[in-house]
Amino acid sequence: MLEKEKTEIYTAEEKNAAAGKTWQQWEQQVPVTGRIRRLEEACWVNPDKKSFEEAAARCELSMEDVMDASRRLERFAPYFQEAFPETAAAGGMIESPLMEAVKMKEIMEQKEGAAIPGRLWVKLDSHLPVSGSIKARGGIYEVLKTAEDIALSHGLISEETDYRIFDSPEMKRLLSEYSIAVGSTGNLGLSIGIMSARLGFRVTVHMSADARQWKKDMLRSKGVAVKEYESDYSTAVEEGRRLAQKDPHCHFVDDENSKTLFLGYSVAALRLKKQLEQEQITVDAAHPLFVYLPCGVGGGPGGVAFGLKQVFGDAVHCFFAEPTHSCCMMLGMATGLNNQISVQDFGIDNKTVADGLAVGRASGFVGRLMRPFMSGCYSLDDSRMYRMLAWLADSEGIYLEPSALAGMYGPVLMAKDPDFRAYGKAAGGAGALNGSTQLVWATGGSMVPPGEMKEYYEKGKKNSLLV
Ligand SMILES: *Cc1c(COP(=O)(O)O)cnc(C)c1O
């Protein structure tokens, strides 16, 4: 609902209401909504989480879907080696490093006065090739699947074809008759735009007002059409979807509902399993894996968490992390209303420095599908993201964008927050927290221009002095 409508048509009492209940009624029924509304940092443990077996039995997607996506990416690997030489060393796989952060753990323990359980690891999706954020997983995957479907329907390939054919003039000519469109706060636009343009598609990115100028500039330099909107992410998506529907040759990447995107993200779990094995890290009941995922609309973190549950079952525990001003997933899950409620309904402005997380209404598909799998959600202040950004840069020499630090607060909460601690202790039996792996999903940052990164870092330093 538009803000203007709300003030003009509704009485004062109705204004302080969401989905048919007053804010006070909501707070009595679902206490965390009080903290959410007051913009206080909050933690929520999911009371509806089920055992993996029970959750998986009722789920419309399965391990076979994850494997299918993985095989598709393998078919494209030879193409990537050629088209994006930076992927050649990894055999054409778009994958990121896994890093232990011993010094960062020390800094956080000292600054926060808390003993973080287990070992602290960071999954550096910030350093994924091609588009430098977690969107390089789902976004690129959906573009590839679209290209593959078109090529198959025109008889240009079979499953045995060498996919380097996708770099041929013939294929580019075919794909140039099709277009791709997406609505984005920035990073999804980058990933879809870069990949689509390289394959020869015509591509339009519908961008919300909060998108950074450098992202728009970079896309335009690659021949991508960028349409800008005054309003927020949901409107850009809505308008993009509407325009795309008129054109039968246009594929709209639907960030809020796409199972293809979701499955593209889920493949990360198969890759992570190998990396953990290489590091000789055990994941089982006595050595649980806790994973903290920055969440916007939910497809990226939801897809990764879905894959992780398929791979590690009850031994993995996944949490969504969001800014206090945009904690739409926590609100949707805690109230049980998923995408039928937005942070704006609680008078929250959806303004955050965290690119990719400025989403006021979560994906209904992800909220529903992930309900029996997720362990919980939490929110944190932007200022905390800045502080941790500077600590990580100082301790490990790794520079991330603010949103990518949202997950970093999870291990601290596992030490400090009574509800999370109780959950953690119950998760793996006595001592399991000490044997745990705390994994922070670092979702973006390597493509941020140095000047912007310097500003982020300096804000973080200043912020750190104030505490
Ligand atoms: C998009 C994004 C996320 C969250 O992904 P969603 O699918 O929107 O939930 C997290 N971090 C960064 C840096 C992103 O760009």
Image (cartoon, rainbow, N blue to C red):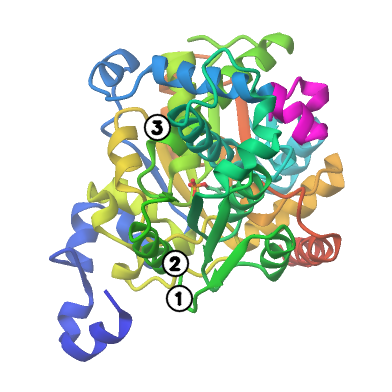
Nearer the observer, 411 or 243: 243
User: How far is the residue under mark 1 from the one under mark 2?
Assistant: 7 Å
User: How far is the residue under mark 3 from the one under mark 2?
Assistant: 31 Å
What residue is pinned by disc 3? 375
Residues in magenta?
78-95
> At label 1, which amino acid type do we have?
Ser
Please name the predominant secondary structure of the magenta segment in the image: helix
Residue at 64% across, 37% down: 170
Secondary element under disc 2, as helix, strand or loop, is helix
Tell me the number on the disc at residue 236: 2
User: Mark 2 or mark 3, which is nearer the start of the sequence?
Assistant: 2
User: Mark 1 or mark 3, which is nearer the start of the sequence?
Assistant: 1
Residue at 82% across, 34% down: 86
Mark 1: give few (<14), some (14-19) or many (20+) Cα within 10 Å. Answer: few
Q: Single out the mark in the foreground, 3 or 2.
A: 2
Q: Is residue 148 above or below residue 408?
A: above
> At label 3, which amino acid type do we have?
Ser
Residue labelled 1 has its Cβ within 8 Å of some atom of ligand 1: no
User: Mark 2 or mark 1, which is nearer the start of the sequence?
Assistant: 1
